[in-house]
Image (cartoon, rainbow, N blue to C red):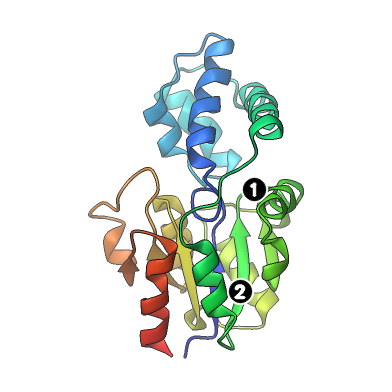
Amino acid sequence: MLRAVIFDMDGLLVDTEKLLQRFWVEAAQFYGYPMKSEHVLQIRSLSASLAAPLLQKIVCEDFDYKKVRLKRLELMNAYIAENGIEKKKGIDDLLDYLDTTPLKKAVCTATDDKRTKLYLGSIGIYHRFDRHISGNMIKNGKPAPDIYLYACEQLGLEPGECIALEDSPNGITSAYDAGCMPIMVPDLTPPDEITKPKTIAVCDSLDGVIDVVKSML
């Protein structure tokens, strides 16, 4: 029985993945590291403990993850302060529909709680969720299942009662391994042959999720 919908944030609710991609590269190149856009795709929703060694492997051995990340935050925060954040297509329609149902709603993001509140507040939807679960609340980030298990615990539900909406392969793996029902709404990359079998559906945009939810109620 479906009882909740859990949302990722970056690339799903807010159009920040393209900014993350841009400013990771700019920050890395500021320090002389040969990082490229395709490298950023591999660390989407990935915890720092996994992202740091991966970047040392695929970019260069001396890649300083902490230093580059701080520069990326500085550049990205400055851009957002001046330009704001765009919301993803279909989010208002989906939230409006979910408000007509008894389903609970939660956000489950690798981003810390301070920026989660800032980003979702800036597009006027922070208050529309029952719970906000951020990466700094759990030990092991995505693709480990911990964050979804914790979100379900906070909602008082079993994972099998929850749809999980994700835009990235790492996020889909996290939700799938937790026992949730993943739906992918692709942002920068489509689902591949490994990711797609872990989903119950793939939707072009968030408003497309409405029909999937209706079919399960």
Crowding at dot 2, Cα within 10 Å, few <14 / some 14-19 / many 20+, comes out as: many
Determine whether the residue tagged by mark 1 lies in a helix, strand or loop: loop
Where residue 183 sits in the image (x, y, percent)?
39, 67
Which residue is labeled 2 in the image? 105
Where residue 124 sits in the image (x, y, percent)?
69, 58
Q: Which residue lies at the image location 65% right of the left edge and 39% below the top edge?
A: 84
Determine whether the residue tagged by mark 2 lies in a helix, strand or loop: strand
Tell me if residue 101 comes above or below residue 168 in the rendering: below
Q: Residue furthest right?
A: 114
Q: Tell which circle, 2 or 1, labels the residue nearer the N-terminal end.
A: 2
Where residue 39 sits in the image (x, y, percent)?
41, 29
Which residue is labeled 1 in the image? 111
Q: Which residue lies at the image location 41% right of the left edge and 37% below the top edge?
A: 41
Where residue 34 sits, quadrant-wise, is top left
- One can see residue 63 in this view: no
Crowding at dot 1, Cα within 10 Å, few <14 / some 14-19 / many 20+, comes out as: many
Q: Are marks 2 and 1 in contact (CB under 8 Å)?
A: no
Tell me if residue 84 comes above or below residue 59 in the rendering: below
Q: CA distance from mark 2 to mark 1?
A: 18 Å
Where residue 36 sits in the image (x, y, percent)?
41, 22
Q: Is residue 188 left or right of residue 26?
A: left
Q: Amino acid at mark 1?
A: Thr
Q: Amino acid at mark 2?
A: Lys
Q: Residue furthest left?
A: 193
Q: Residue furthest top?
A: 32
